[in-house]
Structures are given as C-alpha cells and as structure tokens.
Amino acid sequence: MTKVKNKKNGIALFQDMKKCKEKISMITAYDYSMAKCVSATSIDIILIGDSLGMVVLGYEDTLQVTVENVIYHCSAVRRGAPETFIIADMPYLSYHLSEEQTRKNAADLIIKGKADAVKLEGGYPSRIDAIKAIVDMEIPVCAHLGLTPQSIHKFGGYKVQGKKPEQQEELLKQALAVEKAGAFMLVLEGIPEILGKEITEQINIPTIGIGAGRYTDGQVLVYNDLLGYSDMQPKFVKHYAEINSNIKEAIELYSQEVKNGVFPAPEHIYYPIT
Ligand code: KIV
C-alpha cells in the first residue's frame, strides 16, 4: 500500500495509482485533532470540504461558507497533517464573479490555508475558464461533477444526477472538458454507478467517487458521516463507528458523576485532603 508521505509527489503518484489500478482513499477533515488521527492512517488525501458549513458550523447547506472559513480550518488541518496531500474547497461565489477574484481566492487557499490543491464544482464553460485560470497560476485543481452541493437550488435539492442518457452525455462531456482544462483529479458525486464507470474509463485523470459506485479510482467520505458523528445517513454512507452515541454516553456519565460527587476521585486531585 502506497502512502503519500511526501505531499509534493502527490499528483504524479495519484496518476500512477490510477494506472496501476490502486484505489485512492480520501476523507474530509476540518481541524487539528481530526487531521492528526487521519495522518496516522493510510489515507492518501484530506479534503477540507465546504461540507464544513453543515457538519461543523451548522448551516443548512454549503452556500454560506466563506474563503476565510476554509482557510481557518485548512490551516488547522495542515498543522495536524504536515505530510498529507490536502485539497481545499473553493466556496460558493469564490470562483464565479471574476477571474481576478478566482485567482486571488485560489492563491489564498494555498498560501494562507496551506493546501496543496483546490477543488471547485461544475463543468460549464465559465467553470472551465476558472480551472484554466487557476492552473495557469501553477495551482493544481480538482474538479467536482454530478450532484454538486453548491447547485442545490438549481437541482431542486440533493438529487442523484445523470439518470437520463442526455444528462449522462453532458456529464461525460464536462468530465472530458475539465481534464482538458488541466484538472488533475475529478470528484464524482451522486451519480449512477454506470456513469461513474464510464467517466473513469474515458478520462486519464483519477476519479474519486462519493455515491458514484464501485468503479471510480478512489472514494471520499465526510469524516463525521463515516464515524457516525452526524445525523446524515444517505445511501452512499457507511458508518465505520457510532461516535455520536459513544460521545453522548460518555458526556452523560461525566455529568452524572459530577452531580453525585463520584468525579473527581482522589487520583484526579492535586494534593487531595486526606
Ligand atoms: O464538501 C465536501 O465535503 C465535498 C465532498 C463530499 C466531496 O465536496
């Protein structure tokens, strides 16, 4: 199993992993202690997703997340995972308004956030221009297609994309376009397995799936979801732990022990009165 010890080799290594059919593992993280745990595993990539708006900040969707939010969380993650390849999400409106702002925001995520690459959603011509502008600044870009959460109002909710043949054709076209624009990786979210397979076979850059079936070059899950540390249980999430109930049980026990005088016990006390 290859561990991307040197983040500087990441992009070439991910490309090789696709060629060798070695799966790439990605997980989101949002703070120092999460990142320390992740960096002690074989995970290849950490994503500071704008999902942080929902799972950490309690917003209803990802649209309110700012570049400053991502920089704040990304720099904390970097301190916990100095050697891991880190991708920072470009929030809604950070790459939509002008090329100058797009370039500045991407550069801030790299310089201030200490990310190795940025991710942005969509494959329409304006997004292709954004990818080209960022790649032109030597910043690696991961594209993101399918059920892109920043488009929920357009989609009318979190709905699987690419179910109809003409939508599949359009998404394949966009995948080819983001590759041509210079993206080094593509996240595919919320699409039928057959489309995930087709896109993965048709493009040369690695694909990372989330709700995109088994045939993508890698998988990504939200940290809180896979640990059972959120209320989200969409079909594509597997709980590898049930942290929520463990935390509640532990905190309840602590509270009870404080209330009935069991905590602190002598071993927790400096110079206890005997
Ligand atoms: O924001 C995020 O966490 C993401 C992943 C779910 C792909 O974009």
Image (spheres, rainbow, N blue to C red):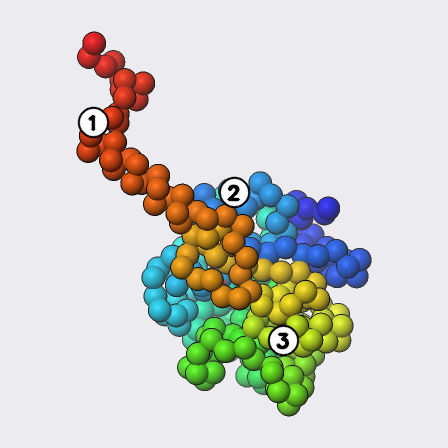
Q: Which residue does the image show at 24% across and 35% down from the upper left?
A: 256
Q: Nearer the viewer, mark 1 or mark 2?
A: 1
Tell me the amino acid under the disc marked 2.
Cys
Q: Classify 100 as above or below 107.
A: below
Where is residue 124? Give x, y as percent.
57, 84
Q: Which residue is mark 2?
A: 37
Compare marks 3 and 2 and give the one earlier in the sequence: 2
Residue sitting farthest toward the top: 274
Q: Which residue does the image show at 80% across and 58% down from the upper left?
A: 20
Q: Which residue does the image show at 54% across and 50% down from the upper left?
A: 240
Around disc 2, counting alpha carbons within 10 Å, would you say few (fewer than 14), some (14 to 19), or many (20 or more)? Answer: few
Q: Is residue 153 left or right of residue 45?
A: left
Alpha carbon separation for disc pair 1 and 3? 56 Å
Label annotation for residue 223: none
Label annotation for residue 192: 3
Front-most of residues 129 and 226: 226
Q: Which residue is mark 1?
A: 261
Element type at marker 1? loop
Where is residue 199? Give x, y as percent.
70, 75
| Residue 160: quadrant of the picture | bottom right
Quadrant placement of the C terminus = top left
Around disc 1, counting alpha carbons within 10 Å, would you say few (fewer than 14), some (14 to 19), or many (20 or more)? Answer: few
Tell me the amino acid under the disc marked 1.
Gly
Q: Classify 209 as above or below 20.
A: below
Residue sitting farthest toward the right: 20
Tell me the amino acid under the disc marked 3.
Pro
Residue 250 visible to an observer of this rendering = yes
